[in-house]
RNA sequence: GCAUCUUUAGCUCAGCUGGUAGAGCAACUGACUCUUAAUCAGUGGGUCCGGGGUUCGAGUCCCCGAAGAUGUACCA
């Protein structure tokens, strides 16, 4: 952005400060206490008349002649400073007169109550720590009955995302979302660590991509002169680690999918995947339910959330249901005994788009997604997915059409996906080759055949359960935000004009 | 992708059936030794998202484009 009138004026002030022999960006700063410390036990600070040095951003200025007030803020709180020429002397007060809201300053003094009764720092010295040369948007606050009213709030949603630093600075409730996100993610790590999982990091740049149905981003490595893919999932690498003898691994990291963006999709997003040897689908349900309940109750501190217009209760025992049963409830169709032709006719009748190469399993999934998924508001483990659309999951022993897989649905949306992982190397090869056929028929989201992964399976992989949770969506739910952009610090945006 | 809506000063916004751009805050100057959305007086500040068109005249009407939001389709 070019210099506007404001920036020009502030640069002139900067020159005036330098002309006084003062470095507006000094190397050294001092602070004896954080503002939050000073806000605890106020009377005691006043009684002891302690001299403290605070540092922070000047967020408001009210100057009147030879005295003035300001508010300085650090990451622990905000306090008013009282600055008078009588206390500072003419030279230092001259510097104060060149201060603006937005500057970082260091203020030394002791605590007292002003005549209006506000707990404040009576300054004996002010030091410039960093001069602001571009004014912050002017947001004013007034506290009425303990509630903070904000005027001229920095609310333009596009500016909030593009200039997130301003959003964080000017809208404390948005900063809190990201603080909470951080606490949720670190608590998830502790939860997994406490259960004997180890956290690992696997490649983001991959020669082949797999583990999900999605289109990838492609990049190029100059020295090797090969194209590489940004991962769409970490599944196949974590499974290699289980082959390698780790029994419980997880990874929290970014996946990249080259698809559209909307309220619940960002091209890069965070997933937690975990794999546990000698566990299975039931173990994964216990793990996912336990983890999410822990994050809700112990980190956020409640079990009822309003999300996407629905009220969702995470306490209590979560429903475990079978996809064919859910579909039967909704449509009266007995999926398993119906012929493929009948299901195809049903899909056509309801104008569901049937991709080429769809078998009975895909049709079942289409019908489920159209008639059932969005009706599941309270947390529901939807089990018994068609094997056809679950190429990495074990088939159910009692029904080869179905896979030992669930998706966790809350408020009509998917929050987790888990399988009893397929460890039969020959079956796995057949499944991936079937995917390759779909790909040849034009399904550019079908899996590719990863020979190195198949070879790893041939060396032997124990039975295990694996799951993946979409962290962004979980944070959306737990912070009650309906847009993924509200829980991503820097959401993907089109290039600005 | 498609549909609808939005885009005016640094920020939040007004701007009627087309007549030459406004407010509050912020800024600047001045006054002010206990303010707190400080107050009072004065001053400056605009590519009305961009590009075309209609018109004597366009912030306003029409067309094209951009960005954003919402809905919808696909996907986590």
Image (tube, coloured by chain):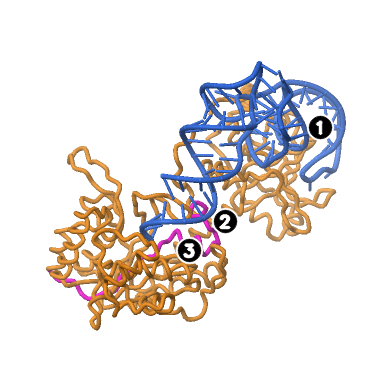
Residue identified by numbered label 2: A176
For marks 1 and 3, give the CA distance: 49 Å
Q: Are marks 1 and 3 in contact (CB under 8 Å)?
A: no
Name the spot of residue A93 as percent of width and height, x first: 73, 32
**Residue B42 location, x and y as percent?**
83, 23
| Element carrying mark 1 | loop
For disc 1, the marked residue is A65
**Is A182 placed left or right of A416 in the picture?**
right
Q: Chain of mark 3?
A: A
Between discs 3 and 2, the one toward the N terminus: 2
Residue depicted at x 60% and y 33%: A132
Q: Is residue A255 visible?
A: yes
Q: What is the span of residues highlighted in magenta in the rendered image?
A: A459-486
Question: Is residue A481 shown in magenta?
Answer: yes
The image shows a total of numbered marks equal to: 3
x 34%, y 54%: residue: A255
Question: Which residue in the structure is indicated by mark 3?
Answer: A184
Q: Position of residue A218 (x, y in %)?
A: 27, 45
The chain shown in blue is which?
B
**Chain drawn orange, letter?**
A
Q: Earlier in the sequence, mark 1 or mark 3?
A: 1
Q: Residue A89, which numbered label?
A: none
């Amino acid at each position: 952005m070019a210099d506007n009138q404001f920036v020009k004026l502030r640069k002139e002030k900067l020159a005036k400060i330098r002309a006084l022999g003062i470095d507006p960006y000094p190397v050294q700063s001092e602070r004896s206490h954080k503002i939050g410390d000073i806000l605890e036990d106020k009377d005691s600070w006043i009684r002891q008349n302690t001299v403290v040095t605070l540092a922070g951003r000047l967020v408001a200025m009210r100057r009147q002649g030879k005295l003035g007030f300001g508010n300085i803020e650090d990451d622990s709180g905000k306090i008013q400073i009282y600055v008078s020429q009588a206390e500072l002397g003419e030279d230092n007060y001259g510097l104060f007169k060149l201060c603006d809201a937005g500057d970082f300053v260091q203020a030394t003094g002791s605590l007292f109550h002003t005549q209006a009764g506000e707990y404040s720092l009576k300054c004996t010295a002010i030091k410039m720590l960093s001069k602001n040369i571009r004014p912050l948007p002017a947001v004013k606050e007034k506290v009425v009955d303990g509630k903070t009213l904000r005027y001229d709030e920095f609310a333009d949603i596009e500016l909030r995302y593009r200039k997130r630093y301003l959003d964080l600075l000017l809208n404390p409730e948005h900063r809190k979302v990201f603080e909470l996100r951080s606490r949720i993610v670190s608590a998830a790590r502790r939860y997994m660590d406490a259960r004997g999982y180890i956290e690992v990091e696997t490649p983001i740049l991959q020669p082949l991509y797999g583990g999900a149905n999605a289109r990838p981003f492609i990049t190029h490595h100059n020295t090797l002169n090969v194209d590489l893919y940004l991962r769409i999932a970490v599944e196949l690498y974590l499974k290699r680690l289980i082959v390698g003898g780790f029994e419980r691994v997880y990874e929290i990291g970014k996946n990249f999918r080259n698809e559209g963006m909307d309220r619940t999709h960002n091209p890069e997003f965070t997933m937690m995947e975990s794999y546990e040897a000698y566990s299975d689908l039931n173990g994964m349900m216990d793990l996912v339910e336990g983890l999410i309940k822990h994050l809700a109750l112990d980190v956020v501190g409640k079990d009822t959330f309003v999300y996407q217009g629905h009220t969702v209760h995470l306490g209590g025992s979560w429903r475990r249901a079978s996809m064919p049963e859910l579909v039967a409830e909704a449509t009266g169709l007995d999926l398993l005994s119906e012929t493929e032709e009948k299901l195809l006719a049903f899909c056509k009748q309801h104008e569901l788009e049937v991709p080429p190469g769809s078998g009975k399993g895909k049709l079942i999934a289409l019908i489920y997604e159209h008639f059932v998924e969005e009706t599941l508001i309270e947390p529901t483990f939807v089990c018994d997915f068609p094997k056809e659309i679950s190429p990495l999951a074990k088939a159910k022993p009692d029904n080869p059409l179905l896979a030992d897989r669930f998706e966790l649905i809350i408020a009509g949306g998917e929050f987790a996906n888990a399988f009893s992982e397929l460890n039969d190397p020959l079956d796995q090869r057949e499944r991936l080759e079937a995917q390759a056929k779909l790909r040849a028929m034009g399904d550019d989201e079908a899996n590719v055949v990863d020979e190195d992964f198949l070879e790893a399976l041939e060396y032997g992989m124990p039975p295990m359960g694996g799951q993946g949770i979409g962290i962004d969506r979980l944070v959306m739910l737990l912070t009650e935000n309906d847009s993924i952009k509200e829980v991503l610090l820097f959401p993907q945006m089109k290039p600005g004009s």
